[in-house]
Structures are given as C-alpha cells and as structure tokens.
Image: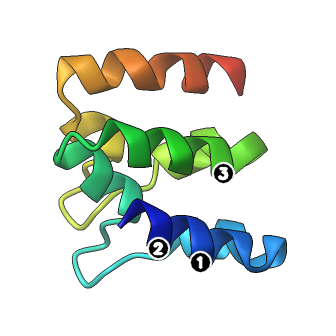
Amino acid sequence: AILYAKICLEVDGNYILKALTAQDRRNKTTLHYATGHGNIELMKFLLDAAGDHVQDFINIPDKRGKTAFDIATPEIKAIMLPYMQNNQ
C-alpha cells in the first residue's frame, strides 16, 4: 500500500495536495486510515508529502467531525505533534 501511495503521489507534484485531501464516502482521508490503523510509515510519508499544508491536512474532519489526530493513539499523536508544531 505504501509503494502504491508513493507512486500515485510522485507522478505529478501538482496533484499531491488533491490526492492527500481526497475523502471517501465517510469523509475519511488516507491519513485517517493510516493513523486509525497505526501505520506509522504511511502516516509519516503522508505528513511529509503535505509540506506546508500539513496542519490543514491533519485537521480535515470525517462525517463524525473527527480528525486524523482525534482518532490517533497516544503513540501516533506523539509522532504527529512535531509535524503540527513545525507548521504553525
């Protein structure tokens, strides 16, 4: 899954943000799934790919109003915090 995500995001830099913020029918992003399933490698890749937009990316709510940060475990939150603090 990570290789597929890297291929999709690296094909054309103009589509990176659009690909990152795409939501399914429950308004979940790839980051919601990565954090919800504890996939640290994919989560870090997605956060790095978001660049200057990482804060906006992390704060996208799903249909229940939950962000990827909201549903993350304490371990995942600890990894996400530096990304959030570096882009304020």
> Which quarter of the figure has residue 15?
bottom right
Q: Which residue is mark 3?
A: 49
Where is 81 relative to 87, above or below?
above
Q: Are the residues at dot 2 and dot 3 in contact (C-beta closer than 8 Å)?
A: no
Measured as percent of width and height from the top left, residue 34 is found at 30, 51
Residue at x 39%, y 53% (from the top left corner): 31
Outermost residue toward the bottom? 25
Measured as percent of width and height from the top left, residue 74 is found at 21, 18
- Give left or right: position of 69 versus 63: right
Name the disc covering residue 4, or none.
2
Where is 25 relative to 59, above or below?
below
Question: Dot 2 lies on which element?
Answer: helix
| Amino acid marked by disc 1 | Cys
Name the disc covering residue 20, or none.
none
Residue at x 31%, y 80% (from the top left corner): 24
Pick the residue in front: 21 or 62.
Answer: 21
Q: Nearer the viewer, mark 1 or mark 3?
A: 1
Crowding near the residue tagged with mark 1, few <14, some 14–19, many ≥20 C-alpha atoms within 10 Å = some
**Residue at mark 2 to residue at mark 1: CA–CA distance:** 6 Å
Q: Which residue is mark 1?
A: 8
Sooner in the amino-acid sequence: mark 2 or mark 3 = 2
